[in-house]
Image: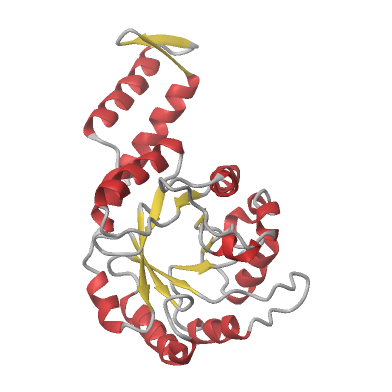
């Protein structure tokens, strides 16, 4: 499943869901959590389940963000809103489920019991306890579509005034959250999905932010506005020059079997370069 861009769409707006199918996103996240006021959730559940049933398999992948599970990791799932979400989705079978306020492998396993075979995308940094569970996801990698993070709920949970410095960059605690998500995803062997860029009018800033994400090892990014989708897709797609260099590296090692290090265009290349080249070519082939 290719996941460069994942666009949030409010679950109580069937008109927007239909329009979003043609916006070029690799996946839509039909939101039953933050984007929907509690009184509108019963209608949203019906709309989302109907949309998934009718549209699944045509166009972008359809994920659903449910409400958080209960905090009692060793007990039954008693998050009332989440239980209602899952009841509504029982016959719909989305392509994936986004799990907010995830706290490690246990929550993933509990959710997987309710929706067997449905890939799960945890938002893995929204509570203080979650920060200490980011190494757990490798245990449940077979249930995951990827791993992502958020920079809004965590500061609220710990009483911080903001997650960003005056220039918009993340402060140290949230740089840590981002980094641990990135490493947790790669440790599990799943997609590392960058968090949203809130200023949807600043497309230049988004392009720079997404480029940094790809540079650091993220493979895709969530979007909150349709205008962000093409920028994100471009950032997380290999360029022709990158593909050509990767092909040259692979061809060079194929022509020199057993070599540990070789020269290409005056620069040394070795096993890590070959591994990166093969990964880039696999992304380009998707």
What residue occupies the far right of the structure in this picture? Answer: 74
| Left or right, residue 22 beside residue 67 | left
Q: Tell me, yes or no, if residue 259 can be seen here.
A: no
Quarter of the N terminus within the rendering: bottom left
Colouring mode (rainbow / by chain / secondary structure / one colour): secondary structure
Depicted 248 relative to depicted 69: above or below: above
Q: Relative to the observer, which residue lies in front, 277 or 77? A: 77
Q: Quadrant of residue 279?
A: top left
Q: Quadrant of residue 36?
A: bottom left
Q: Tell me, yes or no, if residue 74 can be seen here.
A: yes
Query: Horizontal and vertical percent for residue 123?
Result: 54, 61
Query: Horizontal and vertical percent for residue 12?
Result: 37, 84
Q: Residue at x 31, y 49 (%)?
A: 206
Q: Residue at x 58, y 60 (%)?
A: 155
Q: Quadrant of residue 84?
A: bottom right
Q: Residue at x 55, y 64 (%)?
A: 153
| Left or right, residue 260 beside residue 19 | right
| Left or right, residue 178 beside residue 140 | left
Depicted 228 relative to depicted 259: above or below: below
Query: Horizontal and vertical percent for residue 243?
Result: 28, 31
Q: Relative to the observer, which residue lies in front, 47 or 38? A: 38
Q: Residue at x 58, y 80 (%)?
A: 82
Query: Horizontal and vertical percent for residue 221?
Result: 39, 53
Please tell me how many numbered marks the rendered image carries.
0
Depicted 231 relative to depicted 154: above or below: above
């Amino acid at each position: 499943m290719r996941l460069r861009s994942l666009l949030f769409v409010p679950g109580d707006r069937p008109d927007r869901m239909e329009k979003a199918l043609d916006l070029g996103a690799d996946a839509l996240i039909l939101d039953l959590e933050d984007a929907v006021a509690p009184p509108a959730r019963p209608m949203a559940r019906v709309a989302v389940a109907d949309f998934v049933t009718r549209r699944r398999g045509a166009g972008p992948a359809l994920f659903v963000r449910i409400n958080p599970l209960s905090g009692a990791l060793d007990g039954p799932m008693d998050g009332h809103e989440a239980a209602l979400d899952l009841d509504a989705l029982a016959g719909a079978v989305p392509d994936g489920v986004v799990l907010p306020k995830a706290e490690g492998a246990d929550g993933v396993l509990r959710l997987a019991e309710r929706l067997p075979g449905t890939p799960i995308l945890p938002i893995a940094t929204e509570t203080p306890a979650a920060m200490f569970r980011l190494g757990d996801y490798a245990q449940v990698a077979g249930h995951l579509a990827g791993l992502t993070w958020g920079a809004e709920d965590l500061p609220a949970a710990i009483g911080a005034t903001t997650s960003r410095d005056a220039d918009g960059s993340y402060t140290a605690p949230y740089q840590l959250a981002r980094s641990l998500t990135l490493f947790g995803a790669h440790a599990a062997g799943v997609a590392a999905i960058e968090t949203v860029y809130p200023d949807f009018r600043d497309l230049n800033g988004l392009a720079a932010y997404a480029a940094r994400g790809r540079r650091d090892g993220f493979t895709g990014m969530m979007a909150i506005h349709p205008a962000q989708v093409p920028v994100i897709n471009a950032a997380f797609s290999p360029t022709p020059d990158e593909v050509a260099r990767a092909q040259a590296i692979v061809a060079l090692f194929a022509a020199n079997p057993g070599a540990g290090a070789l020269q290409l265009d005056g620069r040394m290349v070795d096993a890590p370069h070959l591994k990166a080249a093969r990964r880039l070519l696999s992304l380009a082939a998707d």
